[in-house]
Amino acid sequence: MPNLQDAVTDYIGSEHYLFLDSAQKEHAEQLLSYWCEQTTNTPEPDDIESALKTVGQLDLPLQARKSFPALLQAYFDYLESIGGFPKTSAWSMQIEYLEPQYLESFRDDGSMKGETVRKTLPKVGRNDPCPCGSGKKYKHCCTGLFS
């Protein structure tokens, strides 16, 4: 099976690449190569989603990051045309599904919204045993680390 990373170089030299918008071409190779590094050669839906999120956090112009799903779709179309990647149509459908939430995750300033992190540890009283397992009271051990 061909390698996704090698196919990026082939795509940049192909006639399919010529049909891209000139604004997309400026960062296309960099974005696609980075995305390929973040995923496997046969990415599953979760791989595609997490790699897409990391691309959104790159220090590149906002428009380049926002247009990445369209670029990825064009790349998948190229991969489907050359063969060797049997799951490209499924990958394309996954990008279609993820694109709206990807675009909504951008703030006005260009940064990306993160996920809310909630503490999973129970509240610890000052005189309770320390949750680190030292056997000491919490107030004499890890005060402030678990609150």
Image: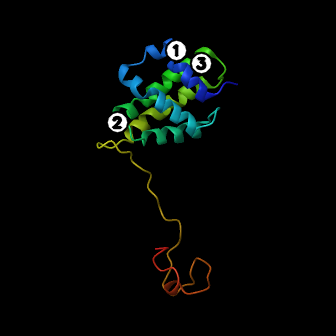
- Front position among marks 1 and 2: 1
Q: Residues within 10 Å of mark 1 (few under 14, many from 20)?
A: few
40 sits left or right of 22 in the view: right
The amino acid type, in three-letter code, at marker 1 is Ser
Query: Measured from the top left, where is residue 130 in percent x and y?
Result: 56, 81
| Label 1 sits on residue | 14
Residue name at image x 48 percent, y 74 percent: 145
Q: Residue furthest left?
A: 108
**Which comes sooner in the sequence, label 1 or label 2?**
1
**Which comes sooner in the sequence, label 3 or label 1?**
1
Query: Measured from the top left, where is residue 106 in percent x and y?
Result: 36, 41
Look at the picture and state if 122 lies above or below 59.
below
The amino acid type, in three-letter code, at marker 3 is Glu
| Label 2 sits on residue | 62
Residue name at image x 56 percent, y 19 percent: 10
Nearer to the camera, 145 or 64? 64
Q: Residue furthest right?
A: 1
Q: Residues within 10 Å of mark 3 (few under 14, many from 20)?
A: some
Query: Measured from the top left, where is residue 69 in percent x and y?
Result: 45, 29
Q: CA distance from mark 2 to mark 3?
A: 28 Å
- Front position among marks 2 and 3: 2
Number of the label disc, if any, that sits on residue 80: 3
Query: Measured from the top left, where is residue 9 in percent x and y?
Result: 55, 23
Check disc 3 and report its element: helix, strand or loop.
Answer: helix
The amino acid type, in three-letter code, at marker 2 is Leu
Check disc 2 and report its element: helix, strand or loop.
Answer: helix
Look at the picture and state if 78 lies above or below 103.
above
**Which comes sooner in the sequence, label 2 or label 3?**
2
Look at the picture and state if 77 lies above or below 44.
above
Q: Residues within 10 Å of mark 2 (few under 14, many from 20)?
A: some
